[in-house]
Every structure is written in C-alpha cells, then in structure tokens.
Image (spheres, coloured by chain):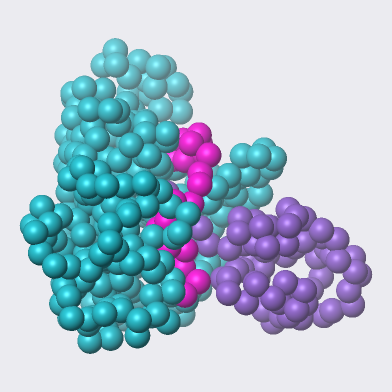
Chain colours: A cyan, B purple
Amino acid sequence: MSRYSRHISLQEIGREGQEKINASKVLVVGAGGLGCPVLQYLAAAGIGTIGVVDFDMVEESNLQRQILFGNTSLGRNKAAVAKEVLSNLNPTIAIHPYTEKLSPENVVSIFEAYDIIVDATDNFASRYLINDAAIVLNKPLVYGAIYKFEGQVTVFNHNNGPSYRCVFPNPPEKGTMPNCSEVGVLGVLPGIIGTLQANEVLKLVLDIGDTLSGKMYCFNALTNQSNTLRFHRNELEIEIVKARGKQFEVLDSSFFCSTDIPEIELKAIAEEDVLFIDVREYTEQPRISLENVIEIPLASLEENIESIPTHKKIIAFCKSGMRSKQAVSILKQHHILNCYSLKYGVNAFAKAELKTI
Amino acid sequence: MQIDIKYFGMLAEITGCDSEKVESEIQTVADLQKVLLDKYPDFKNKDFRIAQNQELVALETKLTGQEIAVLPPFAGG
C-alpha cells in the first residue's frame, strides 16, 4: 500500500483508516467545476467505489475550470471521460459512470449502491432532488455550490442533522431562477470549493475531526473572507419530504422530462422550411445570421408568444440545448406543438458550416 | 441600535457592497427583512435567509445581535 503511505503514516488515519477509505462507496453527481476536483481527490485517496453522474458533453468553455478534461475530451460525455482519467490516476479502484440525467425515476436505483452522496450539480432542480433522495434513502450528502467568486459548502442529512430544505425550504420561484446562460465564474473557485467537499467526504468516511453538518461555510475568493453560519434541523420540512417518499417532487419539467421534449439534429432539418428561434441572450456569441432565424431570449419568450408564426416547424436553439428545451416546453404549453429543441445548440451551426457572424 | 449587515452573492451585487452598517430601532428579524426589501426592491425577486450572530434564524426571532448576514442560495457548480 505504498500508494497510500502518506495517509497511513498519519496517526488519525493509519492502516485501519485507509482500509475504511478503500471500502467506502461515494457517488458524485455532476462532473463539472465542482465534480472534477472532488473526483480527483477521492480517486487519489483510494475511495474504493466511485460513481459519477453526468449526462453532459465536454465543451471548450468547460476547460477553464473542469480540470479532468482536455482538448481530446471535447464533445465526449463527462462521466465517461472522468472514468478514463480517474482509472489512470488510480487503477486500484472501481469507477462507475452514469451517462444519463439524474431524474426522479432513476435517482433511487443510482443512490442505493453508495454510502455518501456529493452534490456537485449546477441547478436547483437537481439539488432539491438529490437532497430529497438523500433524506428518503438516509444517505449523508456533501453539498457545494458556487456563484462567480463565492462558494458554499456544508454536509446535509448526517446523524439526524439538517438538510438543504432546512436552509432553503423551497427552490426559488421559476422566474427568479438564473437561466443557464453563461454566468461567469473564477476558474479556481470550484477547485477550492470542490476540494473542501472532498475533505468533508474523507472526514465522514474516517469519522475524524468535525464535519460541516449544521454549518454553512461561505468563502469569498476576492476578499479571502470566510463565514460559517450555523443552522438547525427543521423537522417539519424533513417530514414533508419523508411523507412524499420516493414520489419525488418534479421541479421543472424541462430539467427532468428531456425525453418528452423532442430534440432534432441540424442535419435532419437543413433541407426543410423551418423557423429557428434563438432563445439565447442578445449578447451571446456567435449570432446566427440566417434569414429564417428570429431572436427571442428565453426570459421574454412567453410575452412574445403571439408574434411567433406557427405555420412552420419551429426549432428552438440556445448554447447547449438546455434552454431551448425549456423554450419548447413553453411553446407546447401555448399549444404550439410543431416545435423541437436543436441538439448541441448553436454549435450545430458551426459544425454544419452555415453562415455565422 | 447599529446593525452590521453582510451580503453574499447576487445580493451583494444588488446592494453594491459586501457589508454596511444600518442604524435602526427595529425589533425582529422580520422587521429587518422589511427594511431590506424597502431599501433594495430587487431583493423581492431573490430568496434569502437571515443569520444573526452566525446563526440562521426564523423571521419571528428578536433582533439582538449586531452581526447580521444575508444568505442567498447558489445553484452553480
């Protein structure tokens, strides 16, 4: 076990502690900015079984912070690439990639095989689903979240401790939820916060030190200030989740009902008479200058719904294909049924070598 | 009573500062929330919890501490 000699020589870990690490099973949901450092440190530490959930593909704009990936990973599934890279880092452990989106339908079967869950996702819908499943299945949950230069870390659902809903009982109102347009983030910030999450995982596995259960650690990379805010279990909120059991709340259909939102590839539609709706913000590049493209950012889609001609097949697109799914969901709610979300988003145009400005 | 208030994340973007001192005779955390919503109307569109002396507290809690933090949820990862 020379691989772990620097662990074993620590009195607090020793051979016994390292065996605990090797016997543990940890699931990391999200292999993005937070998930990459979490996965690297957990794999290096010798966590015996690591699960990675991520349906997304590696994009060039990920490489500034998602340090498991490189140029050769572009366009490939993040969980699959993570398995390859981590297997090289530590071939003595088992790594299970889950390349589908976490959903109320698959969350139980995925979570059941693990001792500890790590939330490294990037949206509220997933965060509430993960929290609720962790409560129902009684798994400790290591939470990390970031915004621009700031991060939050805590441990939920550990030894009858509080949960995410004890801090924020309900997700933000739909209209106030940040959309997935590129909010900037300092590349090193998820590295710091994800590494703190990996630290919490190891303390939970080893049962040493004090975890952040009941304490929200807040870090600001610009000021180097940190604040630790205590919080308590809210039995009422926990009971609501337990009463729902495995009938998990579906928070935003566009996050979970991807199979219900029809997607289409550009090559399948290039010959047809269609209307494209660019639902990105006006500032996002590159713009698509085709004649049959109209621009309506997602946030103002509903108020402009009357202006959309409905006699053509409608193809909504955004950067990656997430917001366009929400757009299709909105259009369908307004009885515009002949509409699709463009797979791979705006990049599809670049690949098809159509004119962009 | 002088209250020291810290703001995090998107709330600090709305206030334009990480922290500020507010002079007020308000009694409860709910009163403080109302003061903040009046001063910063954009807070109405944001979720946040208020901590007093490094502890998240319910709105009916009596305002005793001078150290307040206003915490929004972050989604990013």
Q: Estimate the x, y position of residue A154 in percent, counting from the top left.
A: 50, 52
Where residue A242 sits, quadrant-wise, is: bottom left
Q: Estimate the x, y position of residue A47 in percent, counting from the top left.
A: 28, 34
Give whichever of A254, A122 is nearer the camera: A254
Q: Quarter of the image containing the N terminus of chain B? A: bottom right
Residue at the outermost top position: A2
Give whichever of A267, B18 is nearer the camera: A267
Q: Estimate the x, y position of residue A194 in percent, counting from the top left.
A: 44, 40
Vertical position of residue A60 compared to residue A241: above or below: above
Residues shaded magenta: A175-196
Where residue A34 sits, quadrant-wise, is: top left
Can residue A32 be seen?
yes
Can residue A242 be seen?
no
Residue A35 lies left or right of residue B5; in this view the side is: left
Give the residue at x 72% y 72%.
B40
Vertical position of residue A318 compared to residue A172: above or below: above
Q: Is residue A193 magenta?
A: yes
Give the residue at x 29% y 16%.
A3
Give the residue at x 21% y 22%.
A88
